[in-house]
Amino acid sequence: MSFAFWSAADTARRVAAGEVTATQITDAALTRIETIDDQLGAFLAVDTDGALAAAAEVDRRRAANQPLGPLAGVPIALKDVLVTRGLATTAGSKILEGWIPPYDAHVVEKLRAADAIVVGKVNCDEFAMGSSTENSAYKPTRNPWNPARVPGGSSGGSSAAVAAGLCAASLGTDTGGSIRQPASLCGVVGLKPTYGRVSRWGVVAFASSLDQVGPLTRTVADAALVLHAIAGFDPRDSTSLEAPVTGLLESLTGDVRGLRIGLPQEYFEAMDDDVRAAIAQTAAALIERGAETVDLSLPHTHLALPAYYLIAPAEASSNLARFDGVRYGRRVEAGDLTEMYAKTRGAGFGPEVKRRIMLGTYALRSGYYDAYYKKAQQIRTLIKRDFDRAFRYCDVILTPTTPTPAFAFGAKATPFDMYLADVFTLSCNLAGLPGISVPCGLARDGLPIGAQLLGRPLDEPTLLRAGAVIEAAVGLGDRRPAIGGAA
Amino acid sequence: MPELTRKEVEEIALLARLHLAPDEIERMQRELGAILEHFAAIASVDTSSVPAMTHAVPMDLRMRVDVPEPSLPAEVALANAPRRDGDLIVVPSSIAPARSGTGTEP
């Protein structure tokens, strides 16, 4: 029997029912990683011993008739920006090569408490900066649907591993689209929660006012299940929301009658023809099931990209100051302290991270602060106001997740060309809203297309409800990728 | 917005404590210049009456109660230090040329 494409919900239910053991599931996942990941390059570290020990503990508790958590026996991979006690965490960077964190991130604690099995750490763009995982300092990750194409990024290892059935779910982080964009490109579900919904404790920080952790899964129901497990207040994150976690597991009613779907004109100007057709088909499917569409405008959308690429690098330039070769990570010795900092950072950071540190330092510099950083923060207010106004007329907003399906390695000629890959996903982070990408068909060349839904703050339940209807109507069904899909 | 000069790139790199090789400085000047050109659009937006947003969700930053709590034991916290001497982390001098260090590799 192959467990490879079992959903997380099915896996946990069958483990709890005693139909299969957590050890059998974990063994199978580790074997698939060993045999398939050479073609994919999703994993940076596999925790064989830790995963088998956790599975044995779940099985022991099951045998002793003790209660099991909601993710009992579910193999989960973690983006390598989430710190794991005793398990190397690199953030895709050479500056952290060999670093063994002394603690688990809040979300990792929550997953372990839910009896999930952490199978390993997966690849990403260095410090989560990128849209293709090409910026990883370690290796490229390939798109399981077509190995000549990128898996998206920055959570490209997370999306590829789930799409190819190497694990039932994964966690990613999303600062400007880094969960939703790779989910879209790999044909899986990716959910970026409301800012503050999930604790950032133990997340290697990129841009603290934008970063959120969220699930990548093969079904919308699994996204609800994993989010339910990781969400909630954590006093160790000063921006963690104290709001209760409710309505996620009850959200999948299949009923979208009367739901008002906003279609913002600014998101339908330039995109691939197949993407346009798939989103039109998605909207039609929602209308057929009783939803209504509302044409609307988010007039400051064109300013989101410059605002984001000033704010995120500015925050990154500050956050990444901690990588100085003193307390952990790589050090390049030098004659005095300042030179040691500069040489360590010059040798440890890759080109895109250096570019963003430079851009951020430039934007925060005395004399330029008002023209760049402050201006970008004011534009952020305008973008948030656009959404506040839009949600008076609609309940969710439907857009494509990306302008095109997965692109080829090396296809983006300049850094700015790569930045444009995030053009539909950035605004959501600037406004702090929840967003989900749900597969909504394949392009003519067989690559997945994702539909993005954006919602009001803390209204993940409505995103999940509408997302599940999209999944049932125009999702990928049993269609599976070239790598891993035959299992 | 003015063009980015090589001198500015060198100044920013110094502020960022980031050593760049000569070819990196040239590339950075070219690439950052091109990126900033794309951002010129924001200058013409009238934001004179718009407050700057610092956080997406309105909230007051919470302060923790000022009570000591257990923290990582020193040995655990220091386990990843590139260079240490007992419970101390060894770094080169910040004010004068370094003498040969007394630290030991972990």
Image (cartoon, grey):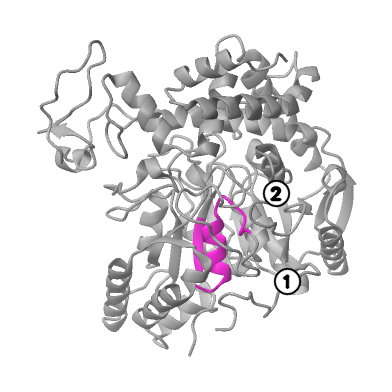
Q: Earlier in the sequence, mark 1 or mark 2?
A: 2
Residue A327 at x, y percent in the picture: 27, 34
| Residue at 42%, 31% in the rendered image | A346
Identify which residue, A471 or A247, lies in the foreground.
A471
Which label is found at residue A109? none
Alpha carbon separation for disc pair 1 and 2:
20 Å
Name the residue that disc number 2 marks.
Answer: A455
| Residue at 65%, 61% in the rendered image | A149
Q: Residues within 10 Å of mark 2 (few under 14, many from 20)?
A: many
Identify which residue, A147 or A248, lies in the foreground.
A147
Residue A155 lies within the magenta run: yes
Say if A199 sits above or below A156 in the image: above
Location of residue A19 (image quadrant): bottom left
**Residue A178, can we see it?**
yes
Is A446 left or right of A283, judged from the image as shown? Answer: left
Q: From the image, state whether disc 1 or disc 2 is nearer to you.
A: 1
Say if A18 sits above or below A201 in the image: below
Q: Residue furthest right?
A: A295
Residue A181 at x, y percent in the picture: 65, 53
Say if A48 sits above or below B93 in the image: below
Chain containing mark 1: A
Name the residue that disc number 1 marks.
Answer: A475
Q: Which residues are magenta?
A: A150-171
**Tag 2: residue type?**
Gly
| Residue at 68%, 57% in the rendered image | A408
**Residue B58, can we see it?**
no
Q: Secondary structure at mark 2?
A: strand
Say if A26 sits above or below A412 in the image: below
Residue B12 at x, y percent in the picture: 52, 18
Q: Residues within 10 Å of mark 1 (few under 14, many from 20)?
A: many
